[in-house]
Amino acid sequence: MSDNSTQYSPAKLKEFKAILDAQLKKTIEELDTLKSNRKEQRQRLANSNIDYNASSKHFQEQAKDKRRIQSLQRKSRELKSALTRIDNKTYGVCDRSGKLIQEARLKAMPTARFDILRK
């Protein structure tokens, strides 16, 4: 890959696709687990007679789970977007400058859309 190139080679794109696919699979599994746990917690709360303190702790945990679910959903969208960019052969191209994002940055953050070192 030369500095004048405006896209990564098919081999590099395949490598990044494997990384993104693995991260997406892990994210979806974690999201499914959290959603399932949240549903079970709601059912347990509805079927039990608990005091205010336990109920308060439950709602705090639910709020924390909700934030985590939202974060995972956002991550999932970013990973899917990156996979779409691979299919479109625009993966690794900075949205701002149109130049290639450094490979080290993409390995550290595969969903990166900007090269932070170039302006």
Image (cartoon, helix red, strand yellow):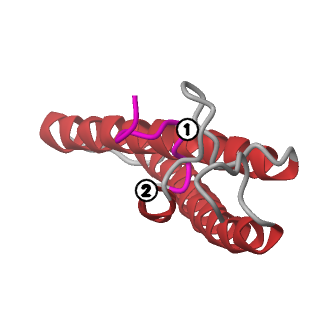
Is 52 in front, or is 19?
A: 19
Is 16 in front, or is 64?
A: 16
- Tag 1's secondary structure? loop
Residue at numbered disc 1: 113
The answer to if 116 sits in the magenta stretch is yes
Amino acid marked by disc 1: Arg
Which quarter shows the C terminus? top left
Farthest left residue? 53
Amino acid marked by disc 2: Arg
Which residue shows up at 57% across the image and 36% down it?
A: 94
The answer to if 84 sits in the magenta stretch is no
Q: Is residue 33 above or below residue 97?
A: below
**Percent position (x, y) of residue 62?**
36, 40
Residue 71, image quadrant: top left
Q: Is residue 9 above or below residue 97?
A: below
> Counting residues from the N terminus, which is met first, the one under dot 1 or under dot 2?
2
Which residue shows up at 77% across the image and 65% down it?
A: 9
Which quarter shows the N terminus? bottom right
Which residue shows up at 70% across the image and 73% down it?
A: 18
The segment highlighted magenta reads 110-119
Residue 78, image quadrant: top right
Q: Main secondary structure of the magenta part?
A: loop
Is residue 63 left or right of 86 when viewed as pictured?
left
**Percent position (x, y) of residue 5?**
69, 51
Residue at numbered disc 2: 105
